[in-house]
Amino acid sequence: MKLQKKIAIITGGGSGIGYETCKLFAQEGAHVVVADRVEAAARRVAEEINQSGGQAEAMLVDVTKSADIKQMIERVVSAHGRLDILVNNAGYGIAG
């Protein structure tokens, strides 16, 4: 397993590419923090990973808010002692 014992945050992990990335990282041994602005989606993904033998936790985060990002990093480092991988997958559009 390539990511054994790594701590990874994946923003936008509740759906799409983020969801698939969460599953892949967990299969490779990472402890995955599923960060999403839709808490129910993040929890669903984390539960799916945990039920399949991986390690994951859900975290409510809105990447458009710098305070949320700062709190996300602080919570992960406080709980796990470090952060090894950050996948900045979440995005948002601006109507033009």
Image (spheres, grey):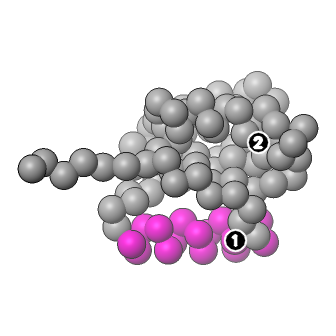
Q: Which residue is mark 2?
A: 55
Q: Is residue 75 covered in magenta?
A: yes
Question: Residue sitting at 30 percent across and 49 percent down?
Answer: 92
Q: Which residue is mark 1?
A: 77
Where in the figure is residue 16, as x and y percent of width and height?
47, 30
The magenta region covers: 66-81
Question: Residue sitting at 60 percent across and 74 percent down?
Answer: 74
Could you classify mark 1 by the number of other residues whose Cα lies within 10 Å: few (under 14), some (14-19), or many (20 or more)?
some
- Which picture quadrant has residue 75? bottom right
Residue at the extreme left of the image, as rendered: 96
Where in the figure is residue 86, as x and y percent of width and height?
62, 58
Q: Amino acid at mark 2?
A: Gln
Question: Residue sitting at 47 percent across and 68 percent down?
Answer: 69
Which of the labelled discs sits on residue 56, or is there none?
none
Q: CA distance from mark 1 to mark 2?
A: 16 Å
Secondary element at tag 2: strand
Depth order, front residue of 49/12: 12
Secondary element at tag 1: helix
